[in-house]
Image (tube, rainbow, N blue to C red):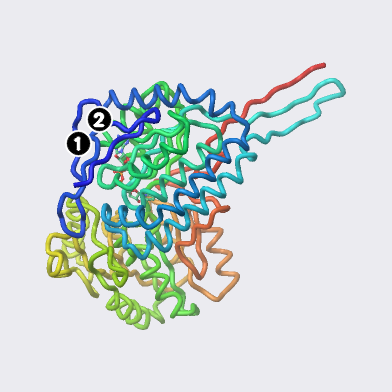
Amino acid sequence: MNEYRNLIGGRLAPAADGRTLDSVNPATGEVWARIPASGKADADAAVAAAREAFPMWSGMPALGRARFLRQVAEVFTRHAEELARLETTDNGRILRDTLKKDLPGMTYLWQIAAGQVLDAVKGDTVILGPDSLGLTRREPYGVALCIIPWNSPISTFSAKAAYALAAGNTVIVKPAEQASASVLRLGELLAEVFPPGVLNIVSGLGEDVGDPLVRHRGVNKVSLTGSTQTGQAITRASADALKPLTFELGGKSPNIVFADADLDAAARGVTVDSVFTGNAGQVCVAGSRILIQRPVWDEMIGRITAIASHVTLGDPLDMATTMGPIVSAGQYERVTSYLEIAEKEGAGLVFGGRTGAEVVPSLPGGYWVAPTLFTASDNSLRICQEEIFGPVAVAIPFDTDDEALAISNDSSYGLAAGVWTRDLARAHRFVRDLQSGTVWVNTFRQMPPGLPFGGIKDSGYGHDAVLEYTREKAAIIQT
Ligand code: NAD
């Protein structure tokens, strides 16, 4: 049994009251690790440590901070295999993705953050008159709280902590209770890198430790990647203190295939690159609504079915596996409940719908859901409106551009959208008119550093980047 501890003030420690939570391997259903079930006392200790370290960290020349961030990049390179295996065991995201994509990407991300430390201290100068100079200073907020979900803990940890630290904030990370092991192990490794209190990590339930952290007057900035409901709860909990918030929340993204598209590319783009992924569609940007123009409806349904039939579910640590399990019993119940909802709503089942041991008989305790496609002609169905967060998509036919836009934008979410077409004018129109934070044209799920990634509507606001973790102060100097 692996045992993990919090990182508070440079020390690794269990929860103050010794409570733990079990971490379940979703491919087997077995408990494989224990993590601290932290509470208010741990939240208070983490805030005190982060506040104590703040003057030193924020007062350090920016290039000094960059040296630490480059050391983190090296930790990711040295421990890539170990961290990838831990994360895969903990949340079921396949090793092919954690090892080959996520970990190399983290080395790159921390190097980029190290290269951006100067952006966080650049301001403007304005000549207001012969004897009057205006200038702006960018300053860190203070203690930044980064609350992360379970689907890609190391990536989300990095996307927030690297930029918050680069900007001069001290940081508290609250990983998700379903999958904290990789981030807590990272805490052990990074305790050797950062001065005490600069980076703190506390695991536990959202209501037990996340909420006290959000409410704590010593926390100056909150960034959440998680569900819309949690974003709303955090908004309410932080309202009295008027805390600045960054929210990357849920989605119900449309992936629109026009008849003139490269159908080979589109078929991959709406399936294995989108919703039938290595972590079983538990991806915020999953294109879970596949809009298909009527002339290519049969052709596309055939291609999607063929690709889905080659998805290999099984042990996520096996490099031959292309789709892993659902992360937890709770999430499994949620995903499977939508299979029943779809049936009751009268959606047509094209393929899938199978769950549990029937899908992966060799691992009967795992939380398995086969790639599933429904059809619907009415976008108001619950399976068209609500985020399922699993390998379940719904195909919706359309005739005209206007209709495709209307269906796409008929959603409370606005995280991402895909458009597959060879018509350049149409591509520009959809980039302009789709209500979403990102629009991909003839590609899907690319999130290169350097471009903002965030949502609109119920998908949140703001995005993790170095300037998001700074505030501006103005000065007018009269001589
Ligand atoms: P969640 O909102 O339940 O949990 C996310 C984090 O918030 C966890 O660490 C949890 O403990 C914490 N939390 C919960 N309640 C809290 C509270 N009251 N105060 C403080 N912290 C609290 O989401 P989840 O189930 O872990 O993740 C799935 C959701 O995340 C989906 O909706 C998905 O779309 C979204 N997500 C979004 C992105 C993105 O970048 N937009 C990326 C990944 C996941």
The residue tagged 1 is: 20
Q: Position of residue 284 (x, y in %)?
A: 37, 54
Identify which residue, 364 or 95, lies in the foreground: 95
Mark positioned earlier in the residue sequence (1 or 2): 2
In this view of the protein, can residue 377 be seen by the observer? no
Q: Which mark is residue 15?
A: 2
304 relative to 166, above or below: below
Q: Nearer the viewer, residue 83 or 326?
A: 83
- Mark 1 lies on a secondary structure that is strand
Q: Is residue 459 visible?
A: yes
Q: Can you tell me which quadrant of the image ligand 1 is in? A: top left
Ligand 1: does it lie within 8 Å of the C-beta at label 2? no
Residue 61, x across and y down, in percent:
63, 31
Dot 1 and dot 2 residues touching (CB under 8 Å): yes
Q: Position of residue 376 (x, y in %)?
A: 28, 68
**Disc 2 residue crowd, few under 14, some 14–19, many 20+, Cα 10 Å:** many
Q: Position of residue 305 (x, y in %)?
A: 30, 78
Q: Secondary structure at mark 2?
A: loop
Tell me the amino acid under the disc marked 1: Thr
Q: Is residue 297 above or below residue 132?
A: below
- Residue 20 occupies quadrant: top left
Q: Given the image, on which type of amino acid does mark 2 rest?
A: Ala
Nearer-the-camera pick, 39 or 427: 39
Q: CA distance from mark 1 to mark 2?
A: 7 Å
> Cβ of disc 1 within 8 Å of ligand 1?
no
Q: Is residue 411 left or right of residue 352?
A: right
Residue at 31 percent across and 34 percent down: it is 6
- Please state, as top left, top right, bottom left or bottom right, where the C terminus lies in the image: top right
Name the residue located 39 percent from the left edge and 51 percent from the top edge.
Answer: 413
